[in-house]
Image (cartoon, rainbow, N blue to C red):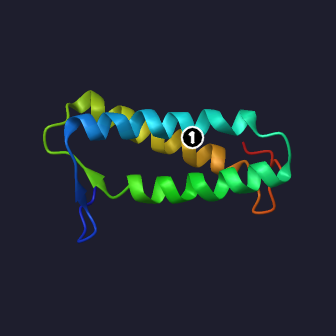
Amino acid sequence: MKLTENTQYVTVAEYRSCITLLRTYKDALYGCCNNDERQSWRARALNHLSKATSFHCHRAKPADFRQFKSACQQLQHSINSVSREGQLINVA
C-alpha cells in the first residue's frame, strides 16, 4: 500500500470494521430496486471507498491486508457495474 500525506492510521479494530463495511456496501447493491437507488448507492460507495483507501494499520495481520484489498476490489467491481445514471452495466 502506498502511503501518502492523506494516510489515516487506524486501529486493528477500525481496520477490520472498515473491511466489514466495504463488504456491506457491496452487498447493499442487490437491495437497490431502481436506477435512482443504484445511483445513490454508487455515490455513497465511491465516497466510502475513497475514504477507506487512505486507511493504514501498522498492527494488522497479513490476512487483514489481504481481506482489505479484496473487499476494496470487490466493491470497485460492483461500482463499475453501475453507470452514473444508475443503470446496470455488464462488466466482464
- Tell me residue 60's x, y (percent): 19, 36
- Toward the viewer: 91 or 29? 29
Q: Is residue 20 above or below residue 38?
A: above
Relative to 63, is 28 on the left or the right?
right
**Count of labels shown?**
1
Residue of label 1: 25
In screen coordinates, is 59 left or right of 65? left
Q: What percent of the width, then of the height, locates residue 79?
A: 64, 50
Q: Quadrant of the C terminus?
A: top right
Q: Residues within 10 Å of mark 1 (few under 14, many from 20)?
A: many
Q: Residue at x 70, y 55 (%)?
A: 40
On screen, residue 24 versus residue 59, left or right, reads right
Task: Choose top left, top right, bottom left or bottom right for residue 59.
Answer: top left
- Which of 74/44 is in front? 44
Q: Residue at x 72, y 47 (%)?
A: 81
Q: Please tell me which residue is depicted at 65% across the width and 36% down the height of the picture.
A: 28
Q: Position of residue 13 (x, y in %)?
A: 25, 34
Residue that lies at the very extreme toward the bottom in this rendered image: 5
- Give residue 24's position: percent from left, percent from top: 54, 34
Kindly indicate the quadrant of the structure image that contains residue 42: bottom right
Residue positioned most to the top: 63
Relative to 3, is 70 above or below? above
Residue type pointed to by label 1 = Tyr
- Residue at point 56%, 43% (across, down): 75
Mark 1 secondary-structure assignment: helix
